Image (cartoon, rainbow, N blue to C red):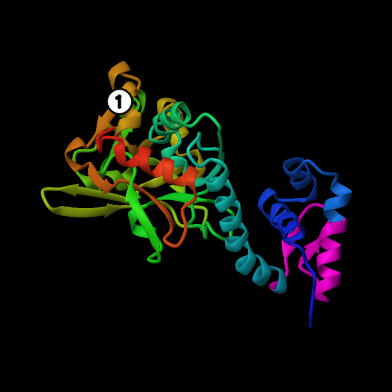
Amino acid sequence: MKNNISADDLAVLLAVIREGGFRAASQRLGIAASKVSTTVSRIETQLGTPVLRRTTRSQHLTEAGQLLVDRVGPLLSAVDAACHDVATLGGQIQGRLSLNVPGAVMPDILPPLLAAYRTQHPDVEVEITVESDLVDIVAAGCDAGIRYGSVLEQDMISIPVGPRRQQMAMAASPAYLDAYGVPQVPKDLTAHLAIRYRLDAGPLLPWTLQCEGQSVKVEPQNALILSVGALNTGFRYAQAGMGIIYTFRNWLEDEFESGKLVPVLPGWWSDVEGPYLYYPSRFAPKPLRAFIEICQATPADA
């Protein structure tokens, strides 16, 4: 069967998926929402099969639509990047950098990197999507992602970004410890209230403690469970005396200095591997290559 689906029409379909709807896609593309809807309908007519399931609130790819996006998305991204590379040859880097990152890098790791990037490449528009689960960045229409090393896809190139190691610490408010006592050994934590985080996929982040080569997992009593997307807000609840929190030590330094929180079992704080930037090995457009250079030039302890 022969069809005459244009690259422009396919780009509209991809915009609908990436932006999460017809109206958002129309705003991104600068065209009427009715034209976006007509374009998708034209693609379905030419293919002879639906590519989107539409409801009043959302749109979801059909199996055929997913196959089309998986095959066409990387090709159109390559065409866009090639055009940008030619247009900016010998001049300022322009275009768009789309990153998919976990909330854990948003407060302190990513801001200085993007500030440096913005200074060097002011003509690049940067868009960040915050998610915690591992994402197929190609299918999601992102240039690169940031994740912690244990969940990286094997077919991706990855480079360290930010600190190479991060320390996990426990803390509580003075009022909480006055009321419930100060834990002396890891086993004591099982009788204490805790502020925990749940991953998007369902499981709670484990409390893994380490001391002189010994590793212990503990299960405290859950007083408050937060989505991992709220990772950098949990210490506010710890300040209010709701329980002991287990989070990145560098996020707690100001609280320790002010006395709003105090360290708990500091001899058992564990180290974890820092985050990585990951991206497809087959393709890196200029805006992404420039960001990679920023990451590689940043000191490991920054």
On the rendered structure, is 36 left or right of 249?
right
Who's the residue at 55% across and 47% down the image? Answer: 86
Residue 71, relative to residue 138: is it above or below? Answer: below
Residue that appears at 77% across and 54% down: 58
Measured as percent of width and height from the top left, residue 1 is found at 79, 83
Q: Residue 84: horizontal and vertical position, in percent?
A: 57, 46
Q: Name the residue at the top extreme.
A: 258
- Please, what is the three-letter code of the amino acid marked with disc 1? Glu
Furthest residue toward front: 90
Magenta stretch encompasses residue 52: yes
Q: Nearer the viewer, residue 199 or 263?
A: 199
Tell whether 47 sits left or right of 90: right
Q: Position of residue 267 (x, y in %)?
A: 16, 39
From the viewer's side, name the closer residue of 89 and 234.
89
User: Which residue lies under the disc numbered 1?
Assistant: 253
Front residue (pair 268, 194) = 268
Q: In this picture, which residue range is highlighted in magenta? A: 38-63
Q: Is residue 36 left or right of residue 147?
A: right
Question: Any magenta on residue 204?
Answer: no
